[in-house]
Image (tube, rainbow, N blue to C red):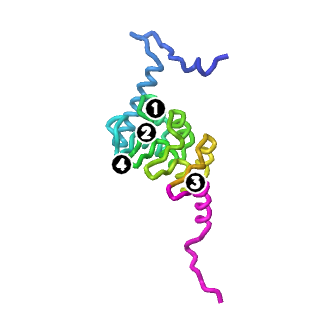
Amino acid sequence: MMSLDNTIAPYKIVGAERAWSIEGSWKNRRRASLAIWLSKHGFPDANSFGVNGITPLMEAALQGEDHIVATLLYEGVSVGMLDDEDNSALWYACLNGAPATILRLIDAGLDIDHANGDDFTCLMQAAASGRFDIMRLLMSLGANEGLVAPEGRNALEMATDYVIWSCIDHRTEAHPVG
């Protein structure tokens, strides 16, 4: 029985002037794809910074382009960079809501409970914006729901506030009774 590991091995194709490696060709295509993506998004290279200190890894996480995130990590970009507001690439992945990218960035070593410059964690950001799917994912991965924001609320309280405020119809005018 053939395993998946055997199908990914770097086979050599012979018969030409020199051996050709499938793995080498795959790496070249991946790098070419990354170069095109970087150029399209205005980054001169994989380690550069854009507007507000956003890195290519953050941009790819925000766009939900997990294949680009994987390629950038494979190419060795620094996973721990922060933008001008002290947000990590994980923050951007949570904004997008891409579970695969969130898992990949946590596996790469990003702190799930990192607080940005406003002392908000990814869990708090998901709660405050009503992204309950992302909240569940982060909590299942060990995010600390007990951490509090500067105003004293934790993520669960923020989620409750979101639900309450979203239930109130602000378009309805109040009419006096009687």
Name the residue carrying label 4.
Answer: 52
Residue at label 3? 154
| Range of magenta residues | 150-178
Q: Amino acid at mark 1?
A: Leu
Q: Are marks 4 and 2 in contact (CB under 8 Å)?
A: no
Of the two numbered discs 4 and 1 in the rendering, the one whose residue sits closer to the viewer: 4
Residue identifier under label 1 = 73
Report the side of 96 relative to 178 (left or right). Answer: left
- Around disc 4, counting alpha carbons within 10 Å, would you say few (fewer than 14), some (14 to 19), or many (20 or more)? few
The number of callouts visible is: 4
Secondary structure under tag 4 reads helix
The span from disc 3 to disc 1 (Cα, nearest Å) is 32 Å
Label 1 with label 2: CB-CB less than 8 Å: yes
| Residue ID at (46%, 32%) | 73
Residue farthest along the left direction in this orientation: 44
Q: Around disc 1, counting alpha carbons within 10 Å, would you say few (fewer than 14), some (14 to 19), or many (20 or more)?
A: some
- Is the residue 141 above or below the residue 117 in the image? above
- Check disc 2 and report the residue beneath it: 57
At a point 57% along the width and 42% down the height, the residue shown is: 99
Sequence-wise, which precedes: disc 3 or disc 1? 1
Distance of mark 1 from mark 2, alpha carbons?
8 Å
Give percent across and percent down for residue 24: 44, 20
Label 3 and label 4: CA atoms lie apart by 27 Å
